[in-house]
Image: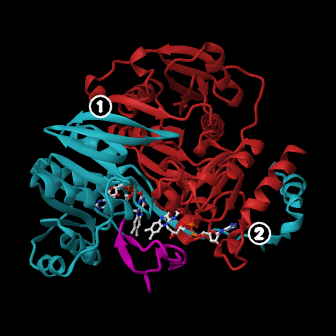
Chain colours: A cyan, B red
């Protein structure tokens, strides 16, 4: 059983986003980069499957050298080796092309991703990769169990969930509660240093979109406080002032 | 050359978000000097399908194969790709949803299309094709320059307010060749709370957090939601603790919503929670702690006990 886990290196969820260079670049000063929270769920489930069935886990990131701390952390959590495609990940199609190229070379049984990145929130890379490989893609996956080469999956749908079955190989976009996030232990951190991390150059150069510039949301106006003993006034204000109800 | 809109049905009715997508698509068609065609799969009657005309579509392609009655992202992508080819469409519009996400990605892969997710405004076509989208989970916006020949725009709720006109679309049956491989996933069972307002579609949302103390206390939240015709939502710990179903969880790691009104009850307002709700038009916060960070991101606030305040709000709504 071979599992590929695709991870992003993204600003910590508590980051206050700002831009530089006339709003054309993310201001990385003082920003901590973490593994995408959804990617963390994918990795955690892969590690559980490895513990149960003896799978091997490869971590893949399309990114520049500054994403290596995130890759090493994934190795510390339990991945066996890692590949970094050395390119700025500036377009979902381009990223998917890189992942599909690696997957074609190595034929994985399961390709686990996060439901969406937390930088572009596209939620697209798994589907594009599935299409490129001609295999099913399923997202967002809340539960994953394996029975031979059949995957038993619970997927979230609007207002509920559904149980699915499909044969491997599959591409899955994961979210909670598929597994609990894992924190690396000391031994993991030590062994991660010597686990193989291969750097390869990208194939293809198709960038189907670029970002011309960024913008920050306008701040909300000051909050209007309503005394608790006159709470009913709120409903009047929503009706007559904000005009939303 | 027409602009193609992928519209979804919910229990045989056009989803509200899809009406918005059709209206948006028709506006884009106007900019480009062409017409708007909607592609709809699944069972629905002709009057309902023709109602796409009210929002600006002149034609509806209705994919009638019974195999499409169950939503299926992969099969729908095959259908939409065939429709785009037949119509020579270069711009495809849809409203973000869990089905649309699954469909769009496969479609982008098939058509090698440039894709903008979470679009929040009409495109600027004066010089290239630039669309504004929400990124970093609502913390910023990007102006995306789509360079591919075919462009897909996935719009967020409340991007545009549809105006209805007195018109109906011409409905044509559409029967493209389906792909066996698209049916490789078998659905064993579905659990869906029917009749409730779908959270991503809702104009009003009443949301509650750990301040409610336990699942047995949710009636105060549900009563207000019912009076407002609102959907219910919750914070992450609440769904982690299994007080509420995961499909109600909003935030950085849950649903991202943009209703007209978001009422947060007993939620502290952590940055990861705000990320999922900060594009709501109006935010109301009810919290017994005057220093709760959520008040800084609210339009209206009440410092008070939810068990006292919510029932009174419910009565006030009923009296409206
Ligand atoms: C400077 C800069 C500019 C950018 N400009 C653009 C742009 O113009 N257009 C655009 O679409 N995006 C842009 N991005 C975002 C970045 O390229 C995204 O990571 C990529 O587009 C995929 O985003 P997504 O939101 O579609 O991924 P999703 O589809 O939301 O991601 C789903 C899953 O796919 C996997 N995945 C996604 N990205 C990677 C990756 N790089 N390596 C390994 N696995 C991955 C992860 O498992 C992730 O959870 C830019 C990023 C940077 C840093
Ligand atoms: C990577 C990451 C991702 C995350 N993603 C999400 C996410 O998607 N969504 C999310 O919600 N969180 C997310 N979190 C968690 C987030 O940081 C907060 O812990 C969480 O939002 C807190 O939930 P809460 O406001 O319900 O609970 P608390 O923070 O415990 O707040 C409860 C509030 O209720 C108030 N209260 C108590 N009793 C009453 C009463 N009787 N009347 C009125 N008010 C009362 C209290 O004053 C308090 O402000 C994430 C965290 C991380 C690290």
Say above or below: B189 vs B275: above
**Residue A76 on image: x %, y %:** 19, 73
First to last magenta residue range:
A10-36
Residue found at x 15% / y 60% = A58
- Badge 1 marks a residue whose secondary structure is loop
Residue found at x 40% / y 44% = B113
Density class for disc 1 (Cα within 10 Å; few <14, some 14-19, many ≥20) is some
Say above or below: B91 vs B143: above
Please name whichever residue, A199 or B143, is drawn nearer the observer in this view of the structure: A199
- Badge 2 marks a residue whose secondary structure is loop
Side of A106 where A27 appears, left or right: right
**Numbered label attached to residue B248:** none
Q: Mark 1 points at which residue?
A: B185
Q: Does the residue labelled 2 lie within 8 Å of ligand 2?
A: yes
Indicate which quadrant contains ligand 1.
bottom left
Asked if the residue under mark 2 is in contact with the one under mark 1, i.e. CB atoms within 8 Å, the reply is no
Q: Is mark 1 within 8 Å of ligand 1?
A: no
Q: Name the residue under label 2.
A: B304
**Residue B237 on image: x %, y %:** 50, 62
User: Could you give the CA–CA distance between mark 1 and mark 2, rounded to whole angstroms?
Assistant: 49 Å
Side of B186 where A122 appears, left or right: right
Quarter of the image where the C terminus of chain B is located: top right
Q: Is residue B286 magenta?
A: no
Number of numbered discs present? 2
Instruction: Report if residue A58 is visible in the image.
Output: yes
Residues marked 1 and 2, same chain: yes
Task: Tell me the quarter of the picture where residue A156 sits.
Answer: top left
**Residue A136 on image: x %, y %:** 27, 37
Residue found at x 53% / y 50% = B244
**Residue B293 on image: x %, y %:** 64, 76
């Amino acid at each position: 059983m071979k599992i590929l886990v695709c991870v992003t290196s993204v600003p910590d969820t508590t980051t206050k986003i700002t831009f530089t260079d006339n709003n054309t670049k993310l201001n990385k000063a003082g920003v901590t980069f973490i593994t995408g929270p959804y990617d963390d769920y994918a990795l955690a489930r892969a590690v559980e499957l490895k513990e149960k069935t003896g799978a091997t886990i490869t971590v893949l990131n399309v990114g520049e050298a500054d994403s290596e701390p995130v890759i090493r952390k994934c190795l510390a959590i339990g991945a066996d080796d890692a590949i970094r495609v050395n390119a700025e990940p500036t377009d979902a199609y381009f990223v998917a092309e890189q992942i599909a190229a690696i997957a074609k070379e190595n034929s994985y049984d399961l390709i686990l991703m996060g439901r969406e990145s937390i930088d572009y929130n596209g939620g697209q890379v798994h589907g594009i990769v599935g299409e490129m490989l001609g295999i099913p893609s399923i997202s967002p996956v809340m539960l994953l169990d394996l029975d031979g080469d059949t995957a038993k999956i619970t997927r979230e749908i609007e207002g509920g969930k559904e149980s699915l079955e499909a044969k491997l190989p599959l591409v899955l976009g994961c979210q909670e509660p598929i597994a609990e996030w894992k924190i690396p232990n000391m031994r993991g951190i030590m062994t991660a240093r010597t686990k193989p991390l291969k750097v390869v150059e990208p194939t293809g150069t198709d960038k189907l979109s670029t970002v011309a510039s960024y913008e920050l949301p306008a701040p909300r106006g000051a909050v209007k406080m309503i005394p608790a003993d006159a709470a009913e006034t709120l409903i009047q204000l929503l009706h007559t002032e904000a005009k939303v109800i | 050359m027409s602009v193609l809109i992928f519209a979804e049905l919910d229990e045989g009715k056009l989803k509200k978000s899809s009406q918005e997508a059709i209206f948006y698509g028709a506006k884009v068609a106007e900019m480009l000097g062409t017409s708007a065609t909607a592609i709809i799969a699944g069972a629905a009657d002709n009057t309902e399908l023709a109602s796409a005309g009210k929002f600006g579509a002149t034609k509806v392609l209705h994919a009638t194969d019974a195999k499409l009655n169950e939503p299926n992202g992969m099969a729908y992508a095959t259908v939409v790709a065939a429709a785009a080819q037949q119509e020579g469409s270069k711009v495809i519009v849809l409203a973000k949803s869990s089905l649309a996400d699954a469909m769009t990605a496969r479609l982008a892969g098939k058509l090698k299309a440039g894709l903008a997710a979470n679009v929040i405004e009409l495109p600027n076509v004066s010089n290239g094709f630039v669309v504004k989208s929400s990124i970093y989970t609502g913390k910023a916006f990007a102006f995306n320059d789509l360079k591919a020949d075919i462009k897909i725009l996935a719009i967020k709720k409340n991007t545009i307010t549809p105006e209805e006109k007195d018109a109906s679309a011409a409905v044509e049956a559409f029967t493209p060749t389906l792909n066996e491989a698209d049916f490789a996933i078998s659905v064993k069972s579905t659990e869906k709370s029917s009749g409730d307002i779908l959270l991503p579609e809702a104009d009003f949302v009443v949301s509650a957090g750990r301040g409610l103390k336990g699942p047995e206390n949710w009636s105060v939240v549900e009563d207000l939601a019912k009076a407002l015709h609102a959907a219910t939502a919750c914070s992450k710990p609440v769904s982690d603790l299994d007080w509420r179903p995961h499909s109600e969880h909003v935030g950085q790691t849950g649903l991202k919503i943009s209703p007209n009104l978001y009422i947060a009850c007993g939620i502290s307002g952590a940055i990861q929670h705000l990320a999922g709700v900060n594009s709501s038009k109006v935010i109301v916060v009810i919290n017994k702690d005057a220093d709760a960070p959520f008040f800084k991101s609210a339009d209206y606030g009440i410092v008070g006990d939810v068990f006292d305040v919510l029932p009174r709000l419910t009565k006030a709504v009923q009296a409206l």
